[in-house]
Image (spheres, rainbow, N blue to C red):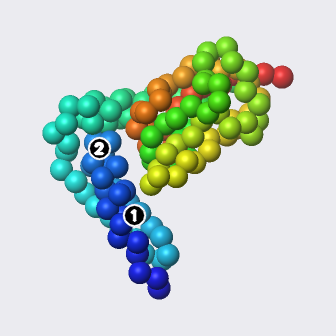
Amino acid sequence: MAEPDWEAVRYALDLARQGGFAELELEFSGTRFTARMEPASNGQATSQLAKVEEAAQDPIEPAGVIAIEAPCVGYYKASGTPLEPGKHVSAGEVVASIAALGLANDVPSPLDGEVVDVLVRDGDVVEFGQPIARVKVTG
């Protein structure tokens, strides 16, 4: 079993603290690492965490509307032309990225459709599976 990259673990912990997250789980090379942290005293991080929790409690989507979800925990960044209501997206089109551990993770649209709502802004902290936009199916 390879030795964990402790510098990467420290970096992940710093990102989690800055984002106001209370728990961090990492798994790599067969090693699992879990950390629980005290709530952030930083008002910005706390408000970002509240936005993440609020978005996670969104009601079920109406028929024909699908959420584009974050593939990992990190910071949201628009790709190319930012998402906005009325914009057409194609299945597989990269519509954003999530920066996690210094790496950009592409967020593809799961379908062809029209953006109904954008639920996050550049720089917002997002959780795994958090809806970042809602798309109405076209075609």
| Labelled disc at residue 97 | none
Judge the density around disc 1: few (<14), some (14-19), many (≥20) Cα neighbours within 10 Å: few
Q: Secondary structure at mark 2?
A: helix
Q: Is residue 96 above or below residue 118?
A: below
Q: Work out which quarter of the rendered image holds the C terminus and state it.
A: top right
Q: Residue at position x 65%, y 30% from top?
A: 80
Q: Is residue 107 above or below residue 36?
A: above
Q: Is residue 2 above or below residue 22?
A: below
Q: Residue furthest left?
A: 41
10 or 40, nearer to the observer: 10
- Please indicate, yes or no, whether residue 39 appears anywhere in the rendered image: yes
Q: Which residue is mark 1?
A: 8
Q: Is residue 61 above or below residue 37?
A: above
Mark 2 / mark 1, whichever is N-terminal: 1
Residue 135 in the image: state x and y as whole percent: 65, 25
Residue 105 in the image: state x and y as whole percent: 57, 48
Q: Which residue is mark 2?
A: 18
Q: Along the horizontal axis of the image, is 83 left or right of 122?
A: right
Q: Amino acid at mark 1?
A: Ala
Q: Residue at position x 57%, y 27% from top?
A: 133
Q: Amino acid at mark 2?
A: Gln
Q: Along the horizontal axis of the image, is 26 left or right of 97?
A: left
Residue 74 in the image: state x and y as whole percent: 44, 45
Q: Residue at position x 20%, y 42% from top?
A: 40
Q: Secondary structure at mark 1?
A: helix
